[in-house]
Image (cartoon, rainbow, N blue to C red):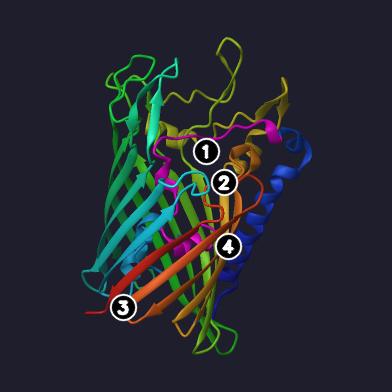
């Protein structure tokens, strides 16, 4: 079919919205509020890290791009539209390599196409925090440990029609940060565990661009890590949210000719966990809502609990609740060029509001496909604050088997 005005409007609207979100930090009182941080923190934050080099070179996006073995993290519903019968991917990311040599993220993903309408996939993500020398308040060593975290996922993806698919995924999460060493408070530590689920949908439609050019308009949405809180002590008195996340966005693929194609994509993200309220010196909440709630209430509350105020140098500045809710969205814009489905060049941009973390970076990368084998590389350039992946080359190896 010819590309509709509605489809073009959706793509253009998301690009304009991304631009407006990027500008919200530089208007009126928000300039003064740069130092009034109110970031949203969670446990097991490794779950939010981009696991593969392809998406990592496009600004950390992938909810509506073409499916591959690493679709689990971005949108598991894409597996139903994957072309090959089976495949797997191995990815490796050095972390904070300019400071330490032994922190890294590894990801193993595999999929199998049951039939033309459905697919299954599994993923394992492992995050090693290297060696850590625990010390007490007297600077006496309590022992050297090797903290680590991992997650194991499984998903079932199915087409509802020739254009729409959906998926559900289950996830087991394990986080061992102390290896049993008792902290100075005297509480008995333990490894944190949780179970979570993802719900995702994917829409894609072939289009005709102009008179001769073909392409695809796609849209994806994924609510990931819907699950229980994590506790790191035996008493389970203190519990922390896991990073429940909303991701959505469109992409536009343009087949320029028989040898060249170009894709543009945008991802929007929002953590669906409560925003910390502003409290007075006695600990009473003066702005915002109580963040000591269960995970489901936290998910619901995350859409309307922004305090709307910030404190800078002892002065309380009003910024508006709706504005602060918008500031909690972060986004990525990326592009991918392919020549003859053999060689690709990629670039992207990632933006997060200065009050909510201030991650801003540009990414570059390339990919190569030959028969069943593929390799992707990515490189990150920080804008503003230093990023743990600055000056780091990360890679993914892919193997796809067309045995239908």
Q: N-terminal of the two: label 4 or label 2? A: 2
Residue 118 found in image quarter: bottom left
Select label 2 or label 3 by which is in front: 3
Select label 4 or label 3 by which is in front: 3
Find the distance from the CA under tag 1 to the CA under tag 4: 27 Å
Q: Is residue 15 left or right of residue 214?
A: right
Q: N-terminal of the two: label 2 or label 3? A: 2
Residue drawn at the location 73% of the way across and 27% of the way down? 317
Q: Residue at the far right: name it.
A: 28
Between 250 and 259, the one lying in front of the other is: 259
Find the distance from the CA under tag 1 to the CA under tag 3: 44 Å
Q: N-terminal of the two: label 1 or label 4? A: 1
Label 1 SS = loop
Residue drawn at the location 54% of the way across and 31% of the way down? 305
Q: Is residue 2 left or right of residue 341?
A: right
Circles 2 and 3 in contact, beta carbons < 8 Å:
no
Q: Which residue is mark 4?
A: 348
Q: N-terminal of the two: label 1 or label 3? A: 1
Select label 2 or label 1 by which is in front: 2
Residue 132 found in image quarter: top left
Circles 1 and 4 in contact, beta carbons < 8 Å:
no
Residue 70, placed above or below residue 25: below
Label 3 SS = loop
Q: Which residues are magenta?
A: 34-62
Q: Which residue is mark 1?
A: 303
Label 4 SS = strand
Between 145 and 173, the one lying in front of the other is: 145
């Amino acid at each position: 079919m010819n590309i509709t005005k509605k489809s073009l409007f959706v793509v253009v609207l998301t690009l304009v919205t991304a631009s407006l979100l990027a500008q919200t930090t530089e208007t009126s009182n928000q300039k003064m509020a740069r130092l009034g941080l109110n970031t949203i923190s969670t446990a097991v934050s490794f779950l939010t890290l981009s696991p593969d080099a392809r998406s990592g070179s496009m600004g950390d996006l992938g909810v509506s791009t073409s499916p591959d073995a690493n679709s689990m993290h971005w949108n598991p519903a894409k597996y139903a539209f994957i072309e090959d019968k089976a495949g797997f991917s191995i990815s490796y990311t050095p972390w904070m390599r300019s400071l330490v040599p032994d922190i890294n993220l590894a990801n193993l993903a595999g999929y199998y196409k049951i039939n033309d309408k459905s697919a299954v996939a599994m993923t394992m993500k492992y995050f090693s925090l290297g060696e850590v020398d625990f010390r007490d308040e007297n600077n006496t060593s309590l022992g050297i440990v090797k903290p680590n975290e991992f997650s194991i996922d499984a998903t079932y993806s199915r087409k509802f029609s020739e254009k729409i698919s959906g998926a559900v995924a289950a996830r087991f999460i394990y986080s061992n940060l102390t290896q049993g060493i008792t902290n100075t408070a005297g509480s008995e530590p333990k490894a944190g565990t949780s179970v979570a689920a993802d719900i995702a949908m994917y829409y894609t439609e072939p289009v005709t661009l102009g008179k001769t050019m073909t392409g695809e308009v796609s849209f994806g949405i994924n609510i990931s890590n819907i699950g229980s809180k994590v506790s790191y002590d035996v008493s389970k008195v203190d519990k922390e949210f896991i990073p429940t996340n909303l991701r959505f966005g469109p992409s536009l693929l343009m087949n320029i000719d028989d040898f060249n194609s170009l894709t543009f994509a945008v991802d929007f993200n929002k953590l669906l966990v409560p925003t910390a309220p502003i409290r007075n010196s006695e600990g009473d909440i003066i702005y915002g809502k109580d963040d000591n709630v269960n995970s489901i209430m936290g998910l619901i509350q995350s859409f309307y609990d922004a305090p709307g105020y910030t404190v800078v140098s002892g002065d309380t500045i009003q910024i508006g609740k709706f504005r602060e809710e918008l500031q909690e969205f972060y986004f990525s814009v990326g592009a991918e060029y392919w020549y003859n489905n053999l060689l690709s060049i990629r670039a992207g941009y990632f933006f997060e509001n200065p009050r909510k973390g201030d991650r801003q970076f540009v990414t570059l990368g390339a990919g190569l496909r030959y028969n069943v084998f593929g390799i992707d590389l990515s490189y990150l350039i920080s804008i503003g604050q230093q990023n743990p992946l600055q000056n780091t080359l990360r890679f993914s190896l892919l193997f796809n088997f067309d045995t239908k």
